[in-house]
Structure formats: structure tokens, C-alpha cells
Image (cartoon, rainbow, N blue to C red):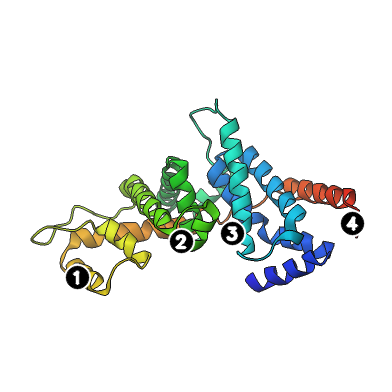
Amino acid sequence: MANDSASLLQRAQAGDRQALEALLEVHQAEVYRFGMKMCRDPEDAKDVLQETLLAMARGVREFRGTSSVSTWLYSIARSFCIKKRRRRVHAPAHEESLDSDAEVEARSIAAPGQRADDALAGKQVEAALESAIRGLDPKYREVLVLRDIEGLSAAEVAEVLGIAVPAVKSRLHRARAAVRNSILPVLNIPVDAPAAPGICPDAVALFSHHLEDDLSANVCAEMEKHLAQCPRCSAECDSLKRTLGLCKVSGKNVQVPADLQLSIKVALKQFLSENGETD
């Protein structure tokens, strides 16, 4: 996708309207998914997507490529999400799930060969994860979404948020621990296993730091040695691995509604027409 996106960007900047439309189409799902996770409201997410893509169309010729297109778009989308958040001063305390009832029902149906209780357990884990992410403070939620769901590097997340990489990592470790603690009861991973003799380290925090390459080789070696003899800490690391694995696939099946795609195309056509650009 990166190569396709770069080619489309180059052509779009040269005035190729079809390339611009294709570029917007390539990135619309990730922007919509980000809006859904951050705004927590489907209608707001639709507005964020349309506003972000139109902002991209307006600024595509000035984009100098000092960052990736995705990073640029996340920065734009985030600014619109913040505006939505500030406007919703009297927003209700209860936030609906990002998924429609039909989508939830569809995913809860057992796949061929899958037991009904397994499907139910999967649905419970998915709901718990969604609730845990929703419960994070926005500054922690956006870091988790960008890093562990959308897959940006810590440096790219820092660029999107306008903060230093250490600040990104600090928020990320807290967000990961909070989400893991929240969904632990439904992960079916025993964390009451016997501990090794002596004092156990904070296995969850250390493993999170390890994922960001923040531990020295000596610390990693000591940690591996401890995990090999401590079932409790090993289970705690497994629970974080499972949590991050779930985050990685969270929302990946979210599709941009067909009517929204059509609305974006109409808005883009109007914008291009008003700026003297034709097919």
C-alpha cells in the first residue's frame, strides 16, 4: 500500500483527479476507524472522515512528504476529533458501541466447527476490550489506538500528537496496563499461579517496555530467566500479549458505509468543480 499511496500522491499533486480520488479511497478506512475509536460516536466519525479527506484534497499539492500520508491524515483527523470533543460538552455519559446490533450479532454466530460457547466467549472478550478502550482518558486512548491498533511507530505517534517519543511511550505503557487489567477477567488466563521465590518484578510493565526496545540486553536476560521459573509472571506477560493481539485486530472489520463513501465523492466533486478542476 505504501508504494501505491506514494504513486497516487505524486499523480494527485500533479493534478490527476482520478489519482486523488483513489488516494482518498485507499486511506478512508483507516481514518474512519480512527474517528470511530476516538470520537466514540458514529455520526461524529462520519463527519471527521469527510472533513479529513476534504482537507487532504485541499492541501495535497502543498504536502511535502516529510511524513507518511497516513501520519498526515491522522494528524488532521485528530484535530477534527478534538473539535468534536470540545463541542460535545453536554455529551451523555453512556456511549454506544461502535458496532451496530447487526454487526455484533453477525460476529457472534459460530463459524463452521466452532462451538456456540466459544463464539459467546469471543463476543464477551471483544465487548470487554471495546469497553476498556472506551474507558481510557483520550490522551491515553489516542496513543493506544495509533500504536497498537493502527500500527504506527512510537516516532510516528509522537509526530501525530506533537509530543516527544518518551511521552508517547509513558502514556502507552499506562494505557496497555489499564486495558489489560480491565479485560483480564475474560481472558481465561490464570494469574494466580505460584510465584517464584523472592520478589517479582512488574512483569507487565517490563514486557511493555521490552516491546518498545527500552530494555537493555542484561535486563532482558534477567527477565527471561525469571519468567522461566515464575508461572505467575509468565501468565501476566501472556495476558498482555493476548491483549495487544486483540488490539491489533480491533476494528479492522469496520467498513466505511456506502452512503458515506457516496457523500464523500459528491463533496469532492463539488470541491474540485468550485476550484476549476474537471475530469
x and y percentages locating residue 28 in the rendered image: 67, 55
Dot 4 surroundings within 10 Å: few (below 14), some, or many (20 or more)?
A: few
Q: Is residue 179 left or right of residue 81?
A: left
- Label 4 secondary element: loop
Q: Amino acid at mark 2?
A: Ala
- Residue 127 percent location from the top left of the image: 45, 45
Q: Which is nearer the N-term, disc 1 or disc 3? A: 3
Would you name the residue on which mark 4 appears? 277
How far across and down, in percent of the image, does residue 43 sit? 65, 38
Nearest to the observer: residue 131 or residue 77:
77
The answer for how far apart the CA atoms under marks 1 and 4 are is 63 Å
Do the residues under discs 1 and 4 have CB atoms within 8 angstroms?
no
Of residues 70 and 241, the one drawn nearer to the viewer in this rendering: 70
Mark 3 and mark 4 lie on one chain; the one further toward the N terminus is 3
Decide: few, some or many residues near mark 1? Use Cα within 10 Å; few <14, some 14-19, many ≥20.
few
- Report how far apart the C-alphas of labels 4 and 2 lie in the structure: 38 Å
Label 1 vs 4, first from the N-terminus: 1
User: Which quadrant of the rendered structure holds the N terminus?
Assistant: bottom right
Dot 3 corresponds to which residue? 71
Circle nearer the N terminus (2, 1) = 2
Q: CA distance from mark 3 to mark 4?
A: 27 Å
In this picture, residue 248 sits left or right of residue 277: left
Residue appearing at x 52%, y 27% in the figure:
92
Name the residue beneath numbered marker 1. 222
Which residue is disc 2 drawn over?
A: 154
Q: CA distance from mark 3 to mark 2?
A: 12 Å
Nearest to the observer: residue 136 or residue 118: 136
Q: Foreground mark, 2 or 1?
A: 2
As drawn, the residue found furthest toward the top would be: 90
Amino acid type, mark 1: Glu
The quarter of the displayed image where residue 194 is located: bottom left
